[in-house]
Image (spheres, rainbow, N blue to C red):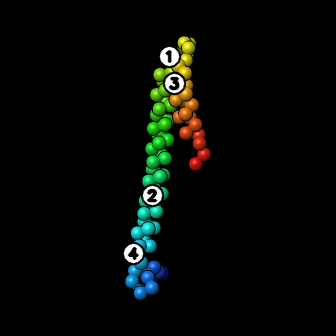
Amino acid sequence: MTRLLEVRRNIDGSIDFDFYRRRAARQRRLLQRIVFRRRLILIGKAAIAFISAVEAPMRGLRRNKVVRQIKRACVAVLTKPT
C-alpha cells in the first residue's frame, strides 16, 4: 500500500518551495562537510606516510625539529574526535 506524501503548503494553498529549497541547501552543506572531512583525512594520512618515509633514513641522525612538528600536527588533526 502506498501512502501519499504530504506536501508542505503556504497559507494561500500554494506549495512552499522555500521550505524544500532550504532543506536541500542544508543537506548539501552537510554532505559537503562530510566529503571535505574525508578528503582531509586522506590527505593527512598521505602526509604522515610521506613524512615517515622521509624521516626513516634520518633515524640515526639528529632529527629535524620541523618534520617532527609537522608530523605531530597531522596526527593531532587525524585523531581529533569528530
First in residue order: circle 4 vs circle 3: 4
Q: State the mark number for residue 57.
A: 1
Find residue 12 and report its horizontal and vertical position in percent.
41, 87
Mark 4 lies on residue: 17
Q: CA distance from mark 3 to mark 1?
A: 13 Å
- First in sequence, mark 2 or 3: give its number: 2
Crowding near the residue tagged with mark 3, few <14, some 14–19, many ≥20 C-alpha atoms within 10 Å: some
Q: Amino acid at mark 2?
A: Arg
- Neighbour class for label 4 at 10 Å: few (<14), some, many (≥20)? few
Whole-percent x and y of residue 32?
A: 44, 53
The mark that comes first in sequence, 4 or 2, is 4
Q: Are marks 4 and 2 in contact (CB under 8 Å)?
A: no
Q: Indicate whether 13 appears above or below 42.
A: below
Estimate the spatial distance between the alpha carbons at disc 4 and disc 3, rounded to whole Å.
53 Å
Q: How far apart are the two marked residues, 1 and 2, measured between alpha carbons?
A: 43 Å
Whichever of labels 3 and 1 marks the residue nearer the N terminus, that label is: 1
Question: Percent position (x, y) of residue 19?
Answer: 44, 73
Residue sitting nearer the eye, 18 or 37: 18
Image quadrant where residue 80 sits: top right
Q: Which of the two discs, 4 and 1, labels the residue nearer the N terminus?
A: 4
Asked whether disc 2 touches disc 3, contact meaning CB atoms under 8 Å apart, the reply is no
Q: Position of residue 2 (x, y in %)?
A: 46, 80
Measure how far apart labels 2 and 3 are at the Cα level.
34 Å
What residue appears at the point 47 percent right and 42 percent down from the top-left corner? 40
* Tag in front: 4 or 1: 4
Question: Which residue is denoted by mark 3 in the rendering?
Answer: 67
- For the residues marked 4 and 2, what is the alpha-carbon distance in whole angstroms? 18 Å
Query: Residue flagged by tag 4: what amino acid is it?
Result: Phe
The secondary element bearing badge 3 is classed as helix
From the image, tell me which residue sits under label 2. Answer: 29
